Image (cartoon, coloured by chain):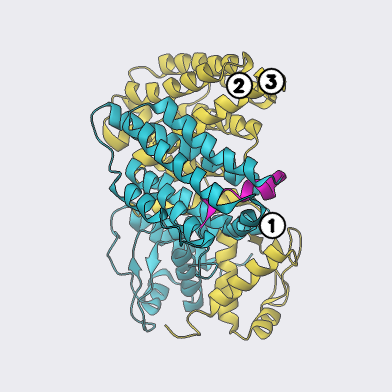
Chain colours: A cyan, B yellow
Amino acid sequence: MTDETRAWQTVLRSVETDLLAGVLKPGDRLPGERALATDLGVGRSSVREALRVLEVLGLIRTATGSGPSSGAIIVSTPRGGMSALLRLQVAASGFAVADIVDTRLVLETSIAATLARHAASGTAPKLTESESLLDAMEDASLSPAEFLALDARFHASLAEAAGNQVIVATMAGLRDSIESYVVAGVPTLPSWPDAVARLMREHRDILAAVRAGDADHARGVVHDHITGYYAETGLSGSAAAAASPHSAPTSTEGPIA
Amino acid sequence: MTDETRAWQTVLRSVETDLLAGVLKPGDRLPGERALATDLGVGRSSVREALRVLEVLGLIRTATGSGPSSGAIIVSTPRGGMSALLRLQVAASGFAVADIVDTRLVLETSIAATLARHAASGTAPKLTESESLLDAMEDASLSPAEFLALDARFHASLAEAAGNQVIVATMAGLRDSIESYVVAGVPTLPSWPDAVARLMREHRDILAAVRAGDADHARGVVHDHITGYYAETGLSGSAAAAASPHSAPTSTEGPIA
């Protein structure tokens, strides 16, 4: 491994050091490619390689129409990076779909319990968006894909209400990573309208348990909601797990967006 | 945004599609830079940018001494990618340290409960490595850094025994992302030997609760173990959370390894 081969790592390390030291912070503009190359004593192609990595990890946004001398902007959008990582790892069999689904179960039951504890301690959780989404999902003219997209947003809205941004980003990544498996679940259901009715009842039950401040019950309702759909699809193994309704929606974006 | 600017995304999308279709799988070799560029109709610099992204995400390993015509090997090492992502996001303030620590709490309590349930159902969890690590940690000549490194490995060994690879990789990433904050915790402790004695007692209690098959108790012991250290350091806010013993060890690797 020659030094030049690893020169892009020098650039990454420099950016990380500057971020940790507070020299760089969200909203700041990185120096242009040419300036970075000169400052760090590496080739411009190495700078460009490091910038792509930072972009995929959600650390920078390159401005539209930016020339080689205008720098990228430091942003902080962990969600996109997490999605890219988990999607590619699932594609490469680095992660089993069943492990992805089980991780969602762990995170989502904890989210429900957290929200319920907030309610119990007198801090009403912010559930306005979650409620609006459920109202929108009552529309009987929704296609399964539309319903599942709103369903995924409902679950994300609970994560956002609970407030832990690491969990919000991880959940988004987990969902995106198995979205290609989700479509397979719907046709296996005995009846889509019956499934919708059950899912909606369970969604309302989740909000009710949260509002009642009953953490154990909220945890249980979420657990049964997710594993129930798994059972109803009648699939086995990881394909069944992948068909959880909580892995929607189908995105029109590219694999790395 | 010109097409050429986004050409590296074309390369990534192509690799993802091939992975999903099973055309590419772990152990396979990607075509060389020149061949990929020709096949996909993009410039070689775009190919190189995409390869760096895949490398950081833990999807490929570039062979030592590889020339431009020899291809990278598909691997599946999600851990490194997760660490890179979380470390840089913490550095860029994308994630608060307190959220990182709370996420560890969610994952680690669930790991303990899972292991206890396995024990209760007659499937003895594989705790040999965890026990060996605790035995090694009894050595009174260990420095705090050495002890904390073993402590982190003990927690990782429980995650591995529980078997969910997404959680294993996420925990490794969470730990690495806050390792630079950990060192600050030790000097604030009233007594390092007393802290070690308490931590060791708690570690043994965790294994005992797991073996007894008591999921609720195992969950509680892990919870108290993590939050107890937080309290003992007497720090406040995210700095205190960062000083959890479960965020070691100090690595000698670069920021992106």
Kindly identify which numbered label has been placed on residue B116. 2
From where the camera sits, is residue B247 visible? no
Circles 3 and 1: CB atoms closer than 8 Å: no
Q: Position of residue B41 (x, y in %)?
A: 63, 86
| Residue A115 lies in quadrant | top left
Q: Is residue A191 above or below residue B143?
A: below
Q: Residue at x 52, y 56 (%)?
A: A248
Distance CA(mark 2)–CA(mark 3): 9 Å
Q: Is residue A132 visible to us here?
A: yes
Q: Position of residue A254 (x, y in %)?
A: 53, 70
Query: What amino acid type should be assigned to the residue bearing mark 2?
Result: Ala
Decide whether residue A22 is among the magenta residues: no
Disc 3 chain ID: B
Q: Nearer the viewer, residue B19 or A208?
A: A208
Mark 3 secondary-structure assignment: loop
Question: Is A206 on the left-hand or right-hand side of A49?
Answer: left
Q: Circle 1 — which element?
A: loop
Q: Quadrant location of residue B63?
A: bottom right
Q: Which residues are magenta?
A: A236-248
Question: Circle 1: is it few (<14), some (14-19), or many (20+) Cα within 10 Å?
Answer: many
Decide whether the magenta segment is chiefly helix, strand or loop: helix
Q: Which quadrant of the rendered structure holds the N terminus of chain A?
A: bottom right
Of the image marks 3 and 1, the number of the one nearer the N terminus: 1
Q: Work out which residue is located at the far left of the displayed protein and give it.
A: A122
Residue occupied by mark 3: B121
Q: The disc labelled 3 sits on which kind of residue? A: Ser
- Please, which chain is the residue tagged with disc 2 on? B
Please give the residue where the numbered disc 1 appears in the rendered image.
Answer: B75
Pinpoint residue B15: horizontal percent, then vertical percent.
Answer: 65, 69
